[in-house]
Image (spheres, coloured by chain):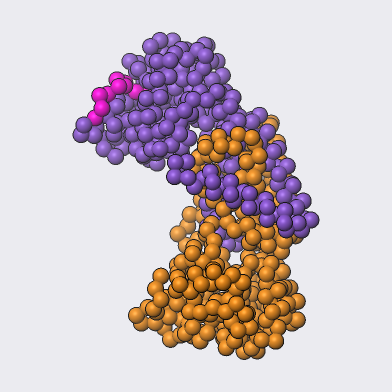
Chain colours: A purple, B orange
Amino acid sequence: MSQTPAPSPAPAAINRLAIIGVGLIGGSLALSLRQAGYCREIVGAGRDRASLQQAQSLGVIDRFELDICAAVHGADMIVLATPVGAIESVCRALRGCLAESAVLTDVGSVKASVVDAVRIGLGHLPAGFVPAHPIAGRERSGVEAATADLYEGRRVILTPLPESDPQACQAVRRMWEVAGARVEDMPVDHHDEVLAATSHLPHLLAYTLVSSLSRLGEQEEIFRYAAGGFRDFTRIASSDPVMWRDICLHNKEAILGMFKHFARDLELLGEVIDAGDGDRLLSIFQRAKQTRDRFCERPDS
Amino acid sequence: MSQTPAPSPAPAAINRLAIIGVGLIGGSLALSLRQAGYCREIVGAGRDRASLQQAQSLGVIDRFELDICAAVHGADMIVLATPVGAIESVCRALRGCLAESAVLTDVGSVKASVVDAVRIGLGHLPAGFVPAHPIAGRERSGVEAATADLYEGRRVILTPLPESDPQACQAVRRMWEVAGARVEDMPVDHHDEVLAATSHLPHLLAYTLVSSLSRLGEQEEIFRYAAGGFRDFTRIASSDPVMWRDICLHNKEAILGMFKHFARDLELLGEVIDAGDGDRLLSIFQRAKQTRDRFCERPDS
């Protein structure tokens, strides 16, 4: 983590980057863009002075503002990196101080409700707004967990709106590419369904498993015998609870749909186990193993 | 992986070790005991000549026999390392050729049904039989995945029976300690309940998640957006399908009990999400995170 740009930086394409919410996600973006010499200045904003001071002393941001309008003043790129539940109030605070030329984007794990929050908060959807979702994270959160390589090789999904200006889309895409990500476009609703399946459901299963076991009585003992598989399986239960509360509240329909789908499949597996049908069990496990091996172990996946 | 013992080996405490089923688990035990110079000779047995030849050429075993009675002839320690479903027929084949002084143990992930299988297969429970379960594994299986350090620091649970000879227990315990494991005793039924919770349920959730997603239609796309958490979560769905079929068939009651417990908890979480109760969601996630962090990240866990 260096406070000086790399020796031969690409020409800075962002003059002033404002990051609202400098935690793991926003902080890592700042670090990687800084390392690439892609921003002349990075301004942080948020509610917690101590955390912003830490971000500054870690070299993640150049300076910070507690007043959000001061933070976005003169910024050509604004990244909303707060939990999803805070976006509406942040946008309300931005009313009247958002430059028409500014590009606005976010990092939320859900997109339909973020679009609603921006529309309601600002009172309209500005042409400079391009919703985005970097599919990356760690079980640790906060700016102290930020790293410059968090997005290296990871996917970032943009969900441009009919209102979105193509040049704004291009600017957001370029920023994420400079951070090392592979960028793709997807419609808003489709994004929310795909992520409910591949991210939200697994996280909620991991949380439920840990809760479920911790209510079994002999807690100490239960967890003592948890093997490596259990650790891997439940690592995501150490993710940020506030972020996951917000995801549940803001992608309710898609998540509940996936819950039903999964619960029915678990019930079916229980019926096969109860019937003692070894052939059927073997074929279920073989197919799952083949699918998982095929999709998850490819070097480019 | 060396074919010669370590420079200053402890005196070999096993004269002839017979391993029935030389895959990941049996092969790794052989490698670690060989590295410690703990066995004068290691004999492998199984049904698949090619796999036994591979085990021999990898230096995992000294020689092999396709005839199980020939394999255990003169062996002072016999390890049943086949899938759980094969134990009864293996024991049937051992009838009449098992020396009374031989110590017999297994590595099965379930214990009550292994004890039944040994009793039925041999026609009685010999005093030399000490059931055991090393809590270790990898998503890869087969002897080519075996490593000498698989059991380093891992737990091995012994479930001695009223019939078990204390000296046999001591011999099995010592063997696993030499392989690097921490050995503990537990009653048979309690073992099966604890493992249903901490190992069998998570594996079956991972298998179900992968199956469930693979039936969602756009398979390619679904898995393309699976993030790191999903990979961790489903790694155990790449485990050996035959082993997991046998575990399901042989620990049915405990597993179905855990399914009910989990399904009810998942349903409750769905109700909280549906109600949009953010405070309750936050407290569920915070508690799960605390529990997971407390039990799973301790260096000694």
Residue visible at 46% across and 81% down in the picture = B38
Residue B215 is situated, as x and y percent measured from the top left of the image, at 66, 39
The answer to which of B220 and A89 lies nearer the viewer is B220
Up-down: is A95 above or below A259? above
Residue A93 location (% of width, % of height): 46, 17
Give the residue at x 60% y 62%. Answer: A221
Is B116 rendered above or below residue A197?
below
Q: Is residue A234 magenta?
A: no
Q: Nearer the viewer, residue B185 or B114?
A: B114
Asked if residue A34 can be seen in this view, the reply is yes
Image label count: 0
Q: Quadrant of residue B26?
A: bottom right
User: Horizontal placement of B175 versus B273: left or right?
Assistant: left
Q: B16 or B256: which is nearer to us?
A: B16
Q: Which residue appears at 57% of the width and 79% of the height?
A: B65
- Residue sitting at the far right: A275
Q: Position of residue B212 (x, y in %)?
A: 65, 42
Q: Quadrant of the N terminus of chain A?
A: top left
Q: In the displayed structure, would residue A213 be above or below residue A85?
A: below
Left or right for A88, reference B269: left
* Residue found farthest to the left: A7
Position of residue A183 in the picture relative to residue B94 (left or right): left
Q: Is residue B107 above or below residue A87?
A: below
- The answer to whether residue A22 shows anywhere in this view is no
The magenta segment: A9-18
* Residue that sits furthest to the front in the current view: B50
Q: Position of residue B257 (x, y in %)?
A: 73, 55
